[in-house]
Image: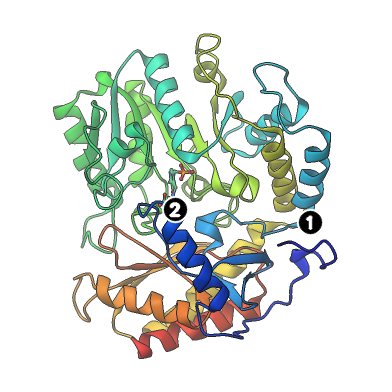
Amino acid sequence: MTDTLLPPASTLPQERRLVTELPGPRSRELMQRRVGAVSAGVGGTMPVFAERAGGGVIVDVDGNSLIDLGSGIAVNTVGNANPRVVERVQRQVADFTHTCFMVTPYAGYVEVCEALNRVTPGDHDKRSALFNSGAEAVENAVKIARSFTKRQAVVVFDHGYHGRTNLTMALTAKSMPYKHNFGPFAPEVYRMPMSYPYHDGPHSGPEVASWAISKMDKEIGGSSIAAILIEPIQGEGGFIVPAPGFLQALRDYATQHGIVFIADEVQSGFCRTGKWFACEHEGIVPDLITTAKGIAAGLPLAAVTGRADIMDSIHVGGLGGTYGGNPIACAAALGSIESMEVDDLNARAQAIGDILVTRLTDMAARIPAIGDIRGRGAMIAIEIVKPGTLTPDPDLTQRVAKACHAEGVIVLTCGTYGNVVRFLPPLTIPDSLLLEGLDVVEAAFSAA
Ligand code: PLZ
């Protein structure tokens, strides 16, 4: 479908333009084929098929130009078809596509690890290993922590999301749709209370942490815990930013008991929140950090980065995989990281965050169903409740999202109770388009 005579997708007109109803005839036809060919188990946010994307828009197969406020679930941080990524990937794909790093290594893998060791929190000696997906990175982080500590227990938190493989399903909190009917799950996983300021009333971060710590002490014992695994800002669980002091108290407990503190920054990492990594907002230095999504502009790449003594404690051959750190994905990562540094995307994420929070705060004054506005940088969400209560309103949330979709604005929902609309635009979106998208969101509340 790609016509080589078309200008680069990164130069697509930055506009919302609907030329058919949504979905248009070509998307409807593809939807029919999808139903006949693709497992019904694979979910779908919108029945609209993409053809090209760049900046802050996705153009569908019918020629509609949609505003992208989802970045393919927090992936296209540097924008689709970012020229720095396109150029490196094109060069790499023409040179070679695969050798397997474990068989015949190549420089790109090493360069990505060097970049990860440099941009992740802490100036201690670090090592990295590359994988294909966020779930795979999390699984490997747990393997590494267990091997290093010679302990088994893994602590996770309410509302946490870590993936869909067997171990990461066990680590994930929410049953439907991620775990439903898919058990039995891996053992030695313990779930602790999470700081959730909007629902915690007067309880502070350190106070909620003390409940978690007391539970860990009594139900597992600090000396039996291999890892504390936490998203510094929870993603799928509802963009929950723990109250100040919560993460630090857990970090201190981990240090005290020789527990490996793992920050899962698959969703919150790589400039999304206005810093390279979300744990930097609280000055937390994790022992291990898992990354994926934003790292490589959509090519499948993930990593575990952390303390050299932990990462190098694994027996030779204990870590790997056929495709982990594939050369094309590494080329994309190097282009993405270059864009983040050269284009100062942390500053851009902060600016986007200011626009989002200002506009949503203004909206909330007229829409009592918006109970909370939270997040950091370009990772912002609203929690939708029955006005005047903390009771989730997932039905209204779905109606608002659908109304946005019908008007050509891609928004995603999340949250344990399905009542959170999240905004995570590509950092290449122009301000005008972001503001237009938010106008559509406000109108969607009226329509819903
Ligand atoms: N850890 C914090 O956010 C992926 C899930 C989409 P994978 N989140 C999007 C879906 O419905 O499957 C995620 C995450 C955090 C781990 C993961 C898992 O990353 O690359 O999807 O395996």
Q: Residues within 10 Å of mark 1 (few under 14, many from 20)?
A: some
Residue 365 in view: no
Residue at x-position 51% and y-position 9%: 315
The amino acid marked with disc number 1 is Pro
Residue at x-position 29% and y-position 20%: 152
Q: Residue 404 placed where, x, y %?
A: 45, 79
Residue at x-position 19% and y-position 25%: 220
Instruction: Work out whether mark 1 precedes mark 2 in sequence or the reverse, and give the earlier one.
Output: 2
Residue 369 shown left or right of residue 127 in the figure: left
Question: What residue sits right under mark 2 in the picture?
Answer: 38
Q: Residue 343 placed where, x, y %?
A: 75, 57
Q: Is residue 288 above or below residue 314?
A: below
Q: Residue 103 placed where, x, y %?
A: 68, 16
Question: What residue sits right under mark 1 in the picture?
Answer: 83
Tell me, yes or no, whether the two marked residues, 1 and 2, touch with CB atoms within 8 Å: no
Q: How many marks?
A: 2
